[in-house]
Image (tube, helix red, strand yellow):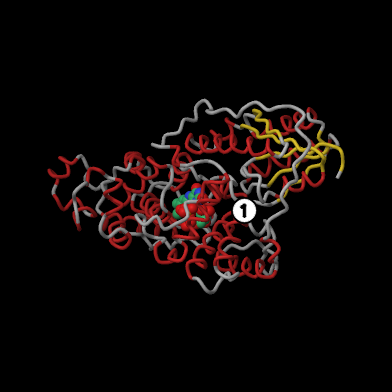
Amino acid sequence: MNHTVGLLWYRSDLRTHDHRALSEAARNHRQVEAVFLISAEQWRSHGVGGNQIDFMLRALASLQHSLRALGVSLQVRAAPRFADAPTAILQVAREVRASAVYAHAEPPLNERRRDQDVGTQLRAAGIQWHLYDDERIVPAGTLRTGSDQPHRRFSSFKRAWLAQVVQNPTGVEQVPSPRPMDPPQAGSEPVPRVLPGFSPTLTDPSAWPATESEANRRLAAFVERAIDRYHQRRDLPAGEATSVLSPYLNFGLISARACLRAVLAHNQGELQSGNPGVTAWVNELIWREFYREIATSFDHVSQHRPFNPTTDWRWPDNESAFAAWQQGRTGIPLVDAGMRQLQQTGWMHNRLRMVCAMFLSKQLLVDWRLGERHFIHHLVDADFSANNGGWQWCAGTGTDAAPYFRVFNPVRQAKRFDPEGVFVRTMLPELDGLTGADVLEPWRLGAEALHRRGYPQPICDLTDARQRALEFYSNAKSATVSANG
Ligand SMILES: Cc1cc2nc3c(=O)[nH]c(=O)nc-3n(C[C@H](O)[C@H](O)[C@H](O)COP(=O)(O)OP(=O)(O)OC[C@H]3O[C@@H](n4cnc5c(N)ncnc54)[C@H](O)[C@@H]3O)c2cc1C
């Protein structure tokens, strides 16, 4: 250990436990200071909204408190755009006389470029720069195909991921906790409670307590009560069958390693056998890592381009359909229920994300990038990699994309996953009291009854819309094939 100060730069890793950069900084320095940069202009240009910012600010306030107990002070500074980060970090490093800066890598292109620039500037000033890949279980770039390329398909990535974790079980271990350090040089200003222009829109932000202990509580409760039946119930939106840990994972209030350790302990150390609920849940953690690997390895997905370049089509404009979809007023109950869940809670069940995204890009033929941005703006768990991967899967432009002729019928989806309409009724008060087929296909009641209830007529005929989608995709595909030769 040396007597210089280490500066820890927090981003989407807002925790003190199982945190590699904090652990390394505390091992190497007698004193550690921490900083977080508010990049409001940059976030706005990325489409980030108030629900996520509110969660982040509360998580930061809680982090500041936990760090203080370790002898680390957390300062919050402004760097309106990522281009301002090198100067801001250098300035803080000089103020606290840091000899090294520590941080965790983030997958999207702008974040990676920002980190390159910061590293260059720090090194030029004689300050060390340590960037760890700690926000996933298997670090970026570890898994390559036989021809030394990044994996493009989930199935091969998953095989390699499982082999890696089995061969290197130490990669899952908790990193050493930091020892309490010398008291900080200076106190820190409290974290702002709001950022101008980023107000939360969801009904009850307190439903998302933004603390590490809440993340751990959710994980423990999920493992105790729900994981054993996860494989059977994960698609039922009314079932509360999933962990609802995504905002906590995305802001790093809990590490992905901690999640894996908890389920391994529950399944006698087995990853892919034994408890089928555990294997299904681990599969989702691998999807998370896969999409992070895609965002890290393929720059063009961060540049609003489809993963598969042959699907860079022009979608027909349909502004009024897009508006109805955003408001949850398409007249298709399962779609509207999903979109209202997003509006009201800042979160949406995975099955509904798939149904709503596919409905927008296929039945309504609206450019998936508009939907992607709408989700980023409203989700508390908005995450570029998972959101982009999910949207491209649904729109048929991505890695393992759903084939173009696979068009979810939202009524059939509702019959499978919400057959009694329990979830639909919870989200759509206009359909209160309806049962059976009436709640899933309320147009059967007739135009006047729908009007009285204030619920719209369906925005499209599902059979015609499916046919239109098939024709559009098939024509677009053949146009690309002939244009390419
Ligand atoms: C169109 C679309 C958009 C999406 N946007 C996001 C997003 O912005 N942020 C986000 O975190 N997830 C996104 N997902 C993935 C998934 O819907 C959510 O991660 C999941 O619903 C979160 O709920 P949970 O924590 O209860 O998940 P659980 O079922 O408990 O799964 C555990 C964890 O695994 C990860 N995970 C689960 N499913 C997926 C998946 N399909 N892809 C990647 N990771 C997954 C999440 O980190 C999740 O917290 C999107 C999916 C689709 C189809």
Query: Which amino acid type is shown beneath numbered disc 1?
Result: Phe
> Which quadrant would residue 225 be assigned to in this image?
bottom left
Where residue 83 sits in the image (x, y, percent)?
67, 33
Residue ID at (59%, 54%) = 292
> Camera-side residue: 129 or 456?
129
Label 1 secondary element: loop
Rendered position, 414 above or below 384: below
Q: Residues within 10 Å of mark 1 (few under 14, many from 20)?
A: some
- Residue with the mark numbered 1: 298
Rendered position, 111 above or below 95: below
Where residue 165 sits in the image (x, y, percent)?
65, 66
Quadrant showing the N terminus: top right
> Camera-side residue: 471 or 246?
246
Residue ID at (54%, 47%) = 248
- Whether residue 391 is visible: no
- Whether residue 324 is visible: yes
